[in-house]
Image: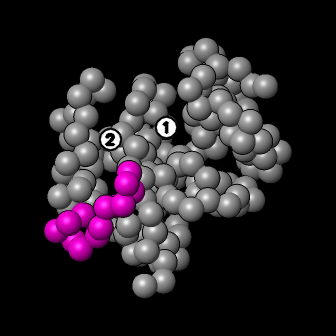
Amino acid sequence: MPADFAAALAAVERMKREGVVTEYAIGGAMALVFWTEPVATFDLDVFVLLPGETMLLVSLDPLYRWAIANGYAAEGEHIVIEGIPVQFIPSHSTLADEAIEEASTLEYDGAPVRVIRPEHLIALYLEPSARTAKRLQRVAALLEESAVDREHLDSILRRYNLTLP
C-alpha cells in the first residue's frame, strides 16, 4: 500500500475525536513541512497528551489497542498508519505540554491538522536531551526561513532556561 500522509493525519485526528488521546500536535521533521523547507525523514512524530496520564506513569497501550482495532500494525516503536510509520511521543515536560496545547491548527489536503508552532519546535530542539547538530540545523532553518515570533520565542526560552546557539 502506498503511503498516504493525509490519511495518516486524518487517522490521528480520529484518535483525538474518539478520546484515545486528549490532544496531539505534529512535531519533529514533518512539522517543518508547514513552517520551512522540508527535510528528509522516514516517520511522523506525533506529540500527545493522554487521558488520565501523568509524566511519572505513561502507558501507550490504549494507542496500540486502537491501532489493532483499526487494522494498523505496530513495528518497533511505530504504528504504521496508512503506510506512514507514526511514532507517538507522550508529553515529557511542561514545555512539551505547552507546545501541544498551543499548537496551530493548519490545513493539509483540505483536512485540519495540529502542528507545533515554530517557536516551540525551536525550544524543543534546544532541550539538553534533544540538542544535536541535526536539530541545531533545524533551529537555524526555522529562524531563517519561517515567520518566528521572536518575542514569543524569547519568552519561551527564558521560561525554560534555554539558549540559542
- Amino acid type of the residue tagged 2 in the rendering: Leu
In depth, the one of 75 and 160 nearer the eye is 75
Classify mark 1: helix, strand or loop.
Answer: helix
Magenta residues, start to end: 67-79
Q: Residue at position x 24%, y 64% from top?
A: 67
Q: Does the magenta stretch include residue 68?
A: yes
In depth, the one of 18 and 65 nearer the eye is 65
Task: Give the image location of residue 139, x and y in percent.
Answer: 73, 39
User: Relative to 145, is 148 on the left or the right?
Assistant: left
- Relative to 9, is 114 above or below? above
The mark that comes first in sequence, 2 or 1, is 2
In the rendered structure, are the residues bearing label 2 and label 1 in contact, judged by CB atoms less than 8 Å apart? no
Task: Give the image location of residue 148, x and y in percent.
Answer: 71, 41
Which image quadrant for residue 164? top right
User: Relative to 136, is 20 on the left or the right?
Assistant: left
Label 1 crowd (10 A; few <14 / some 14-19 / many >=20): many
Classify mark 2: helix, strand or loop.
Answer: strand
Task: Give the image location of residue 13, x and y in percent.
Answer: 34, 62
Which image quadrant for residue 140? top right
Task: Give the image location of residue 80, x and y in percent.
Answer: 38, 66
Q: Circle 2 sits on which residue?
A: 49
In depth, the one of 129 and 103 nearer the eye is 129
Mark yes or no: residue 24 visible: no
Label 2 crowd (10 A; few <14 / some 14-19 / many >=20): many
Mark yes or no: residue 87 visible: yes
Q: Residue at position x 68%, y 24% from top?
A: 154
Q: Residue at position x 62%, y 35% from top?
A: 125
Q: Circle 1 sits on which residue?
A: 99
- Amino acid type of the residue tagged 1 in the rendering: Ala
Q: Residue at position x 70%, y 28% from top?
A: 151
Q: Which mark is residue 27?
A: none
